[in-house]
Image (cartoon, coloured by chain):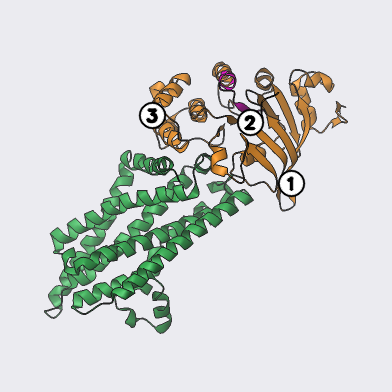
Amino acid sequence: MKARRLAAVALRQFYLYAGSPTRLVPLFAWVAIDIALWGFITRYLNSIASAGFDFVPALLGAVLLWDFLTRVMQGVSTAFLEDVWSRNFLNMFATPLLISEYILGLVVTSIGTSVIGLLTMLCLATLAFGLSFFAYGAAIVPFLLVLFLSGIALGIAGTAMVLRLGPASEWFVWPMPAVLSPFVGVFYPIATLPSWMQAISRILPPSYVFEGLRAIVRGEAWSPAGLVFGFALSILYIAAAGWFFRHVFRVAVRTGLLARYSAESTS
Amino acid sequence: MPPEPVLVVRNLRKAYRRTVAVDGVSFAVAPGEIVGLLGPNGAGKTTTVNMVLGVLEPSEGTITIEGIDLQKRRSAALSCTNFAAVYAALPGNLTVEQNLRVFGMLYEVPSLTAQIEEMLKRFDLERFRGTRSGILSSGEQTRLSLAKALLNRPKLLLLDEPTASIDPAIARTIRATIRNFAEENQSAVLWTSHNMYEVEEVCHRVLFLSHGRILLEGDPKLLPREHGAANLEELFVQVANEQLHDGVVR
């Protein structure tokens, strides 16, 4: 693996963001709107609920963490889609670039864009609504790590799907976090779900983050073992997503899909 | 002893279910040699180029570039190549200089900044360095694609109709540039074109493809006479119309 080629993939994305306000603004705008909306909802809930329970770390914190995962996933998939939209596959993949370098380049891009989103959310949630990450203690670090890894796995799987099904399938990628959110219990305990949904939630790493978050907010003991399992699962999913992308790429090279990949030929 | 060929293609075949696009093609390109790949639309030229570029897997056969098996060591083999194709414009949302920097890094070009400057100068793109590629004219975009293609001084250069959208004066300059590059760098060039005048001027040897097979091979200046055609264009038309029988036009 060559660091220079990996850097080239990330540099291309940096050039795009640096030269285009229409790409930069959404990095701040959507997360800010989300935090503002949920910030006011939590403020209202605090005013009508019985004293003693603070909705800010429970609800607004959960929204912030879920948005972080979504931004990580979109960081990977948007960077990939830039190559789809500019019909750049032939130029990119006729170079010595390895698939692993390409994917890692997308991940590096996603780290940059998602950190911007996270800092924006954190500033707004802290300054306007009094959310503090200190409320979660040291657990916030593994929480963010598991969500980051899960977002990366989702992003890679989504890009592989677009590569396989064609440019029009990008519309399957955007709602992926929304489809998962009912199962991982962003806003409610997993125990609320019917048993078949609980079975699915057990194999989704973010479930362990949100269960842990709620336990900390309620002042109850939480299971680091569950989070370790979630971490292991997210690593497994990244490996599986990487394998899936590589497999789809090989199929695309074999069938000629890569050579003629464009909106006209595959949608 | 003749030098080892840069590109060796053996028994190359590409089939899509029942359609055979390329059928048992074999050829080699020596250092400094410019080989024209000719044939009517659908003859298998671009399919062959795509297989050599590693973006299309052959159904059968092998491709070696500088002695490296493309199937087994894709990245190493592709580091010796570069290409320009009329259908593969560089991303229009990056500037000329940004495109050259990104692709220069992908090809791991040493002294990249100096090399970019040389390419900008060679292809008369200096005044467009900060211009987004997408708003360049088609001729300027072609020059940019060629600048990218020569950036890493490839030992194998693949050009798919490189002068298709360029005016005759610039096309002549570009032909000279590529010819000089091939000679100075001892690079092999595989060149597809529908411009027979251009092919005759530039190529040392041509391969006529039809229905995925090599039908004729030889010196573009001698080939027409050898097969009873007035010139290369007439020979091309005869091949396209399948009027060539037993090596003679009827």
Count of labels in the image: 3
Kindly state the secondary structure of the residue where label 3 is placed: loop
Q: Distance between the residues labelled 1 and 3?
A: 42 Å
Where is mark 3, residue-wise?
A: B131
At label 2, the amino acid type is Val
Labels 3, 2: front one:
2
Q: Which of B68 and A21 is in front in this view?
A: B68
Residue B27 at what x, y percent from top left? 72, 33
Residue B143 at what x, y percent from top left? 50, 25
Q: Numbered disc 3: what chain?
A: B
Q: In which quarter of the image is residue A14?
A: top left
Q: What's the mark number on residue B6? A: 2
Kindly state the secondary structure of the residue where label 2 is placed: loop
Q: Residue at x 36, y 67 (%)?
A: A231
Q: Chain B is drawn in which colour?
A: orange
Q: Numbered disc 1: what chain?
A: B
Q: Can you say whether A128 is above or below B184 in the image?
A: below
Q: Is residue B143 visible?
A: yes
Q: Numbered disc 2: what chain?
A: B
Sort mark 1 into few (<14), some (14-19) or many (20+) by Cα contacts within 10 Å: some
B182 falls in the magenta region = yes
Residue B59 at what x, y percent from top left? 69, 49
At label 3, the amino acid type is Thr
Residue interval drawn in magenta: B179-194
